[in-house]
Amino acid sequence: MSGATGRTVAQAVGETLVARGVEAVFGVVGSGNFVATNAMVAAGARYVAARHEGGAATMADAHARMTGRPAVLSLHQGCGLTNALTGITEAAKSRTPLVVLTAEATSPRSNFFVDQPALAAAVGAVSLRVTSADDAVAVAAAAVDTARLERRTVVLNLPLDVQGLPAGGAAPPAVPAPSPVRPDEAAVARLAEALRAARRPVFVAGRGARGARTALGSLAERCGALLATSAVAKGLFRGSDWDLDVSGGFATPLAAELISEADLIVGWGCQLNMWTMRHGRLIAEDAVVVQVDDDATAIGAQRAVAFGVVGDVHATAEAVTALLGGPAAGGYRTAEVRDAIAARGRWRDEPRTDGEGGRIDPRALTAALDDLLPAERVVAVDSGNFMGYPSMFLDVPDEQGFCFTQAFQSVGLGLATAIGAALARPDRLPVAALGDGGALMGAAELETVVRLGLPMVVVVYDDAGYGAEVHHFGPDGHPLDIVRFPETDFAAIARGHGYDAVTVRSSADLEGVAAWLAGPRSAPLLVDAKVTREEPSWWLEEAFRGH
């Protein structure tokens, strides 16, 4: 245990991760990760204990998304890793900068043995392993560097038979500096020419464009482009007269109309996938499609494009703006379009009901919550039939106000997502929007919210069933007993965990939410919303298309 440096391999790995820039660690501690986790805490990192490894994985994912810095997920060997695998898959598919530090049983005789590198590879994560005392520091440093510079989820295996060895005294390698990918001059010129020729250009910005609002806004003004985002970048252009909000399945009728009439669509750090482009139906047959991304493999990966520009979004936008020069063009920015966006640019401008039969219309519920909740908020949304209501009716102040863990489309991640986002943005009111199925799947973390003292609003859209299956299979006459459940008293469950809670069956019941917001907020609030069951979700066709 002593060694030349007085520390073990497990301690050296933990210390190196923090020295490399990790500030937040999430996990469930067992014997295999106890020493390394304590080493990270001693080195200055904040450790957040979850109640389930799946929750810990999603908290770490959300925290890294919101801060842009790698977080660590700390896990026990074997079952600790497999419990977290859905959250790790979501992170890997989303290219979240995350280090999964997991103990590893390398002997096949161990009951904890699984092929952990194979599990990592199967879900798209990078696998690294500490193999000796001599390479421990270098491998740990490489894990953080890979996560940060390549935006990858890295599974760092720490074998049990190596952890207790005396650590070597080697210093970690120098920290490599990030280098934004500069676009090729010819590609910049080609994009500038396409923008000059366009009469109805639309920009669709994705996660890779977060932080580039000013550069993209200046270019859009120069060429007269309308502005839209993918779901993960919702809020990026909030406040602009030309903001269409989210493109794709969540697009308003007006946004869908304007995007489908564009003669040029430029995706900025955006995959232009089936969700964002409604399986291509938002793109006119004669529209020119261009994609800008700093990852060459992303260009054209989801759909064919006229051409791509490999480069950092911010740097590319500035380069194209400089090349365009001259006065701003009118483009798609007419007085008629601006007035239409002002009048019909939000979902709440569309007609809706109040609900009936002791259940509230989820559209009326969410629009009312949008009015009640403070503007400075961070919204996290689970997956499921309900998910469009908060995504479409709850405004956010900027791209830091929306955390959307949907690359794997798993139900049950919403509450943990909200916890990670809340810890990353303590200056904003966290709002978790969950369906009844996802709320029960993630219920283990209700206690975590209380223990951490988070002033969170948890909204459960309870339609007493798996609504997506009800709406998808019901019209064809399939029996639905297997996807319907008795009504759950979520308010009682929440109070048992130490929440304030209100049950909402009509707009009048929202007075309880207003009272909580006006009070000291000494406990989190759960809104148990009994929503109408038979309201079909207009984004449902997108979810099931091609299944």
Image (spheres, rainbow, N blue to C red):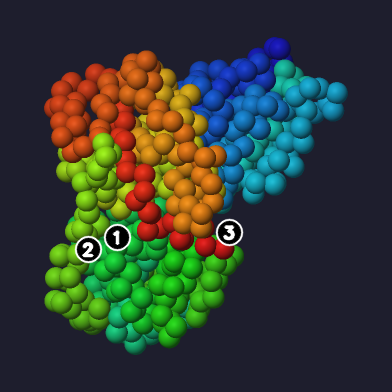
In the picture, which quadrant includes the N terminus?
Answer: top right
Left or right: residue 355 compared with residue 168: left
Disc with the residue nearer the chain's start (3 vs 1): 1
Task: Say which of 299 and 14 sits in front.
Answer: 299
Label whose residue precedes the other's in the sequence (1 or 2): 1
* Residue to which mark 2 is pinned: 345
Is the residue marked by circle 2 packed among few (<14), some (14-19), or many (20+) residues within 10 Å?
Answer: many
Residue 455 marker:
none
For residue 268, which quarter of the picture? Answer: bottom left
- Mark 2 vs mark 3: which is more N-terminal? 2
Q: In percent of the image, x 50 and y 80: which residue is there? A: 306
Number of the front mark, 3 or 1: 3
Spatial CA distance of label 3 from label 1 is: 27 Å
Q: Which mark is residue 245?
A: 1
Q: CA distance from mark 1 to mark 2?
A: 8 Å
Q: Secondary structure at mark 3?
A: loop
Question: Relative to the observer, which residue lies in front, 316 or 447?
Answer: 447
Q: Position of residue 466 (x, y in %)?
A: 47, 42
Residue 503 visible in the shown view: yes
Relative to residue 544, is residue 379 drawn left or right?
left
Q: What residue is disc 3 on?
A: 547
Which of these two is toward me, 499 or 133?
499
Tag 1 near tag 2, CB within 8 Å:
yes
Amino acid residing under circle 1: Asp
Depicted 298 relative to depicted 9: above or below: below
Amino acid type assigned to the residue bearing label 2 in the image: Gly
> Which residue is drawn at the image coordinates 38% and 39% (left, top)?
463
Mark 2 and mark 3: Cα distance apart in space: 31 Å
Q: Position of residue 302 (x, y in %)?
A: 55, 67
